[in-house]
Image (cartoon, grey):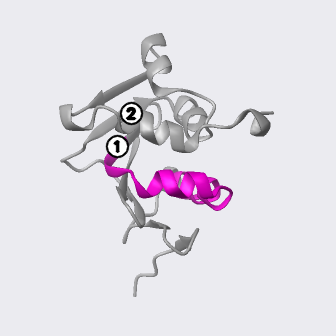
Amino acid sequence: MVVMRAKQVSPNIEVRLAQGTSSGLASIVQQFLAQQLEESEQRQRRALRIHGRLGLIATDYCAAVTVEFGGHEIAVRDGTPEPLDASIAGTHRALTKLLQGEANPLIEHLRGHLRVRSKMRSLCLPLRVHRLMKLTPSERP
């Protein structure tokens, strides 16, 4: 029997690990997303408007996860099976800063710290996810 962990962050959004997902990176991503959505109704509204599959690849650890945004559900799974709407690749540290809302994917791409790719129909997906995760001035250390 497989038990999937899920976190209901609002009456409308569930952030969960997909069946069979067990990597540390997937757990970190799921926990960050759940925590960010729990703390803000505005973020919950933003998350409801995001649709697509975003791959996150930690190049220094050979680890990858896919985050599937589907309105009322966000699923995190191991690997980056095609088709992806966008992907972000970089070191574990760079991805962690991104997930914590401390880094902008476009700026980090231009600096060479991250490699960001998007399909033409999903050009804004990485930026929309960044907007969901970024820290407000009152949240910054």
Tell me the amino acid under the disc marked 2. Answer: Ile
Q: Quick check: 67 above or below 38?
A: above
**51 in magenta:** yes
Q: Which residues are magenta?
A: 27-55
Q: Residue at x 53, y 54 (%)?
A: 24
Residue 17 horizontal/vertical position (percent):
45, 66
Q: Residues within 10 Å of mark 2 (few under 14, many from 20)?
A: many
Q: Residue at x 52, y 51 (%)?
A: 29
80 relative position to 75: left or right: left
Q: Are marks 1 and 2 in contact (CB under 8 Å)?
A: yes
- Give the spatial CA distance, label 1 vs label 2: 6 Å
- Identify the residue under disc 2: 88
1 or 2: tag closer to the N-terminus: 1
Q: Residue at x 38, y 67 (%)?
A: 18
Residue most extreme to the top: 111
- Identify the residue under disc 1: 55
102 relative position to 17: left or right: right
Q: Quick check: 92 above or below 23?
A: above
Residue 90 horizontal/vertical position (percent):
45, 28
Tell me the amino acid under the disc marked 1. Answer: Gly
Q: Residues within 10 Å of mark 1 (few under 14, many from 20)?
A: many
Q: Quick check: 4 above or below 108?
A: below
**49 in magenta:** yes
